[in-house]
Amino acid sequence: MQTKLVRVSETEVASDPEQRKAIEKAGQILREGGLVAFPTETVYGLGGDALNRESSRKIYAAKGRPSDNPLIVHIACLEALYPIVEEVPESALRLAKAFWPGPLTMILKKSGLVPFETTGGLDTVAVRMPSDAIARAMIEAGGGYVAAPSANTSGKPSPTQAKYVAEDMDGKIDMILDGGAVCIGLESTIVDLTEERPMILRPGYITKDMLEKVLGEVEVDRTILSADSGLKPKAPGMKYRHYAPKGELTIVSGEEDAVVDTINRLSKENTVRGEKVGIIATQETRERYAAAVVKCAGRRADEEAIARSLYTILREFDDEDVTVMYSESFEGSEMGQAIMNRLLKAAGHHVIETHKSKEKEER
């Protein structure tokens, strides 16, 4: 299969005739059962017709994704929600008013219109309305319902640029819409509205505090920052190792001086062994590291910048054949939980807790 890559612009897609033609072609591909990768505000998605079970099977095959890992159904307008769920609760309407279009996914009871191939065999469906203009135009052109996980080989870092989509998907899908770099860089927040109390199943840009201002008390799934359980995943990214670079990643947590000292010591030891070492640092610490490849994620106080750069850094490590990586920990009050959720999964929950006088390694 030859994968066609077409450049489009979020600011011009509605007015430029050639870009409109590209969107219409993408929509035709989706309606005919093909696959199209496209930008959203979070990461690039790999889209297929959400109501076509064969399209969903193609998505799983292209990604090498386990078929019990649910796909998110993307819609372009609120009216499209009603046919694919049993009912739309008041809580969902409040969240939609506050955060749609945007980086929030809601889990609701599915209707018979959505095949089990799209929901990973579950009787619930994950739905979101992206804010990216290219994504919404393509969804409308494709029939209104696009199932789309991230557009990467399963387990690898999610793509925030089209070149990484092409790296994983060239020859496997019909088209890539290249809309440039995304603006958020981490997948959407997922909140389950099928239980008695709303529960966050995946943290993201929309934080617990933001949700609670709309809904009142919101619970957080206890496995978000812990090792994967053996439970069947109710939402994307809950069960399987995700976001991982090719090399071995370890998170080092603790006081800044101890973290820097530990990473420098381990980096030196691994360099002597012949490994190529990479470090994810902050603007405040980058000059304190001596490894061959040091990547700055941004200022520690700027959690949005760190989130936006994380997957790109992991991909760049792969590009540069880095074999051993160390990252500082990023527990913050805003997007810190989302950043750590992705980092922990990328590292297989390999964490070193370090202090001035001792280190403790955890799995």
Image (cartoon, rainbow, N blue to C red):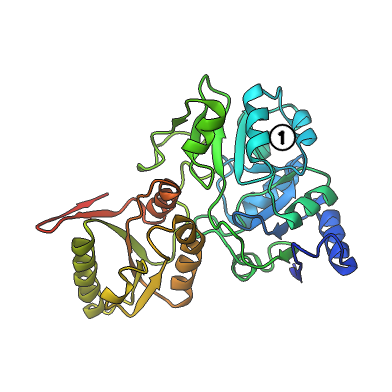
- Please tell me how many numbered marks the rendered image carries: 1
Query: In this rendering, would 105 be left or right of 312?
Result: right
Q: Is residue 358 left or right of residue 337?
A: left
Secondary structure at badge 1 equals: loop
The answer to whether residue 234 is visible is: no
Give the quadrant of the N terminus.
bottom right
Q: Quadrant of residue 252?
A: bottom left
What residue lies at 79% left-to-right and 33% top-to-bottom? 79
How far from the left and from the top, in percent, is residue 28? 86, 55
Categorize mark 1 by other alpha carbons within 10 Å: few (<14), some (14-19), many (20+): many
On the image, the x and y values in percent for residue 249 come to 35, 62
Q: Position of residue 105 (x, y in %)?
A: 61, 39
Residue 314, visible in the rendered structure = yes
Residue 292 rendering spot, x and y as whole percentages: 33, 80
Query: Residue at coordinates 46% horizontally, 46% vertically from top-left?
Result: 240
In this view of the protein, which residue sits in the foreground, 66 or 359?
359
Q: Residue at x 37, y 43 (%)?
A: 225
Q: Nearer the viewer, residue 134 or 234?
A: 134
Direction left: furthest residue: 357
Q: Is 33 situated left or right of 191 in this image?
A: right
Residue shown at 77% from the left, 40% from the top = 77
Type of amino acid at the residue the image marks with label 1: Pro
Report which residue position mark 1 lands on. Answer: 115
